[in-house]
Image: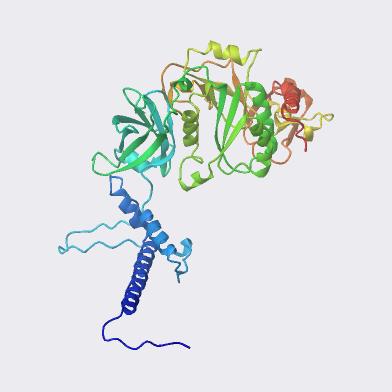
Amino acid sequence: MRKETPPSSAPSTASTVGKLFVCFETKPLVATLLALTLVMLLWNLPPYYQNLLSTTRPCSAPPITSVAAAATTSLLSTNVSLPYTATPIAEKKYYSAPKAKPSDPSKRVFEAYGNAAALFVKMGAYRGGPTTFAVVGLASKPIHVFGRPWYKCEWISNNGSSFRAKAYKMLPDWGYGRVYTVVVVNCTFPFNPNQDNLGGKLMINAYYGESQRKYEKFTALEEAPGSYNESKYYPPFQYEYLYCGSSLYGNLSADRMREWMAYHAWFFGPSSHFVFHDAGGVSSEVRAALDPWVRAGRATVQDIRTQAEFDGYYYNQFLMVNDCLHRYRHAANWTFFFDVDEYIYLPDGNTLESVLNEFSDYTQFTIEQNPMSSALCLNDSPQQYSRQWGFEKLLFRESRTRIRRDRKYAIQAKNAYSTGVHMSENVIGKTLHKTVTKIRYYHYHNTITVHEELCREYLPLTAKNNVTWFNKLPYVYDDNMKKLANTIKEFELKTIGNQNH
């Protein structure tokens, strides 16, 4: 039975504590409601305003999302459930606030909605040597074509000091960019900014135009204390040869990729490495063809599929080759750039080592192509073409002369600031073009996406010794690659095992 105490004329201690308890119980509720209101407002804040706020503050102000995160953390700590269901992004509509109408009716107002392209999209930033850095990315093409954006570099050391350097920008895609163009920003300091090896970070100021008032500031690269190793920027390098591939896209044939990889792993030898960029072309079958080489340490496959968000030329292939150039700038003596339907070949008994020793005084050299038919085969009944590799049975070379054909190239990356798909225009040193007697490449155009039988037109055996006209083009018999087929197959079997699954 509950006992009731008689009322007291003076306020008791218990009643005072009770009132205080009610007071302190109410305050968290009010704080929770305020936090909930703030989160709801920020949740429904259009991204346009967030972008606008971030682009109008040149200094590093705390981002709005961090405020929202803090408020959310505070809210969750009170164990309050949110009576709110988020709307899917695809269903949301964002609106920009209209500008105030001017009092003067003759004064026109221009109202902007949304952001069409980013000022800078960073893919990678790399130290290129003791005093130089490269930042590789994309930028709005119109702003570079019609405006004058520029960049500034600053190194902020962990010891509290900072150093600035004027940046030099390069646009290496030869005007092929679409909404976005490729930009390589070179930052060269008069000395090593991390010479005490205490670490620091490289900051980039990206300016919208000639004015210094409007810019974006971002951290391009960070070096941890003790991580700087000057020896990595000088020979001997990890590899003799490196392959930098363009973007892989489309419905690629796993068989053609297998053949290409086996051939070039043999051609370049054990001191080589291959870098592929998957823009959607590496299917599960293609991945299965490359995985044995990845496991063997001979190849790397980088997933670049999100590049599709930024409309550049041919799956941003200029961006990929420039990122690869700088990412592996000091990884090899020579870096090769060509496609996965092209096969490097050494005529007349040349060796790769002897050819490159002869070319060592040049920063880069270009390679002439032998264009091959993608459909013509010999009507040789004993041959089981379905079991042969592509370069083993496509034996007819298009023989026109005195016409300009696309070339591919190799470069001493340590002497290059940026690069292109067919050659670099930003190098230190000489370029050699007359290389046809030393090195060539066979180009099997329109074969990399063929999944059915490649032989679609059969020529009589007499075509070996005659010129054949097909689709108004002359072709001659060329079996140089066929002669290497058995050697390549034996090499593949010995190196990664049986792949005939």
Of 201 and 471, which appears nearest the observer?
A: 201
Question: Which percent across, then down, holds residue 349?
Answer: 66, 12
Of 414 and 26, which appears nearest the observer?
A: 26
Side of 485 relative to 329 (left or right): right
Question: Which percent across, then down, holds residue 322?
Answer: 46, 32
Identify the residue at the far left of this view. 104
Instruction: Please report the residue visible at 37 percent of the width from the left and 39 percent of the height from the top.
Output: 219
Q: Is residue 403 visible?
A: no
Q: Is residue 332 above or below residue 205?
A: above
Occupied quadrant, residue 341: top right
Quadrant of the drawing holding the C terminus? top right
Side of 413 relative to 146 (left or right): right
Occupied quadrant, residue 99: bottom left
Instruction: Please report the residue visible at 35 percent of the width from the left and 33 percent of the height from the top.
Output: 158
Of 239 and 138, which appears nearest the observer?
A: 239
Q: How is the image coloured?
A: rainbow
Q: Is residue 163 visible?
A: yes
Total marks placed: 0
Question: Which percent across, then down, holds residue 416?
Answer: 44, 23
Instruction: Please report the residue visible at 41 percent of the width from the left and 64 percent of the height from the top.
Output: 75
Side of 400 relative to 476 (left or right): left
Identify the residue at the far right of this view. 382
Question: Which percent across, then down, holds residue 176?
Answer: 44, 37
